[in-house]
Amino acid sequence: MCGPVAIGVAQAGMGIMSSMASHKEAQRAASRQNQVNQQAYQRNLQIARNNDEMKKKAYEGQLNAQAEAVAAYNKELAINQVEADRAGNEARQKKQEKNTAAAFEIEKQIATAIQAQGKMLSTGASGQSFLLQTLQAERELGLAGAQLDQGLQDAHTAYARDLQGVALDHHSADAADYNRLPTSPLAQQASWIPNKPIKVKGPSQMSLLANIGTSIVGGVATGYGIHQQQQIIDNG
């Protein structure tokens, strides 16, 4: 009886030891896998942080460049305004010079007409000849006045055209400076945060107890089977 029992106990013990060894190895494997998964998670998380930091620095650099470009643009607008004012003043000065020259010319023509009339009066002439000479002097004065008026009108038209050209040049310069402005930078989307790894679970204590129970049952069954065979042999 002792032989079969010993064999059954030995088999159960070996089964229990094997179950416990397998249980521990499965637990160690699960622990190693969790460690590998955690290291990979931390590495991916650090990569995402580094990427976001580089995106942040790039965005800040773009913002600084945009601010510098806007400051330069505002300076160019001020320069364009100064140039437009200078060109407008130059056009006004030209018109004023023509007005002044015309005023002096009118005074000169009037003085000449008065002087001519005075000469005619000093001769003591009268009659139709005197009247014709007087009309001729008035006609010459009127013609000179009409020419001066036309000249002033032409000067005013040229002045308006010059001012329009100055305004168009000013607008074109401002538009060209605006078109050279860089587009407003957009912040890049943050990196996706890696998902936390799901913890790998090792075998439970219940599974170990079940395996141990199976080993004990197997050992008992083996011992009982050997005992039955010996009984048959002995009775035979």
Image: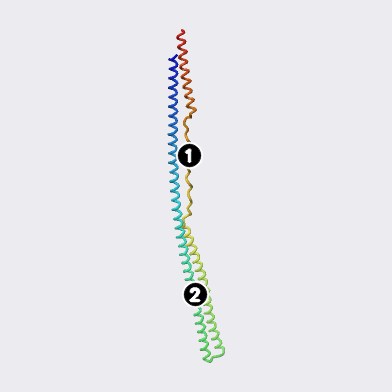
In the displayed orientation, state which residue is furthest to the front.
2
Residue beneath the point at 44% across and 45% down? 49
The residue that mark 1 highlights is 196
Q: Nearer the viewer, residue 84 or 166?
A: 84
Residue 59 screen position, x and y as percent = 45, 51
Label 1 SS? loop
Q: Give the residue drawn at x 44%, y 31%.
A: 27
Q: Nearer the viewer, residue 59 or 145?
A: 59
Check disc 1 and give the amino acid type.
Answer: Lys
Dot 1 or dot 2: first in sequence order is 2
Residue identifier under label 2: 96
Question: Where's residue 58, x and y in %?
Answer: 44, 51
Q: Residue furthest top?
A: 236
Q: Residues within 10 Å of mark 2 (few under 14, many from 20)?
A: some
Which residue occupies the foreground of this view, 25 or 152? 25
Q: Residue at x 54, y 86 (%)?
A: 134
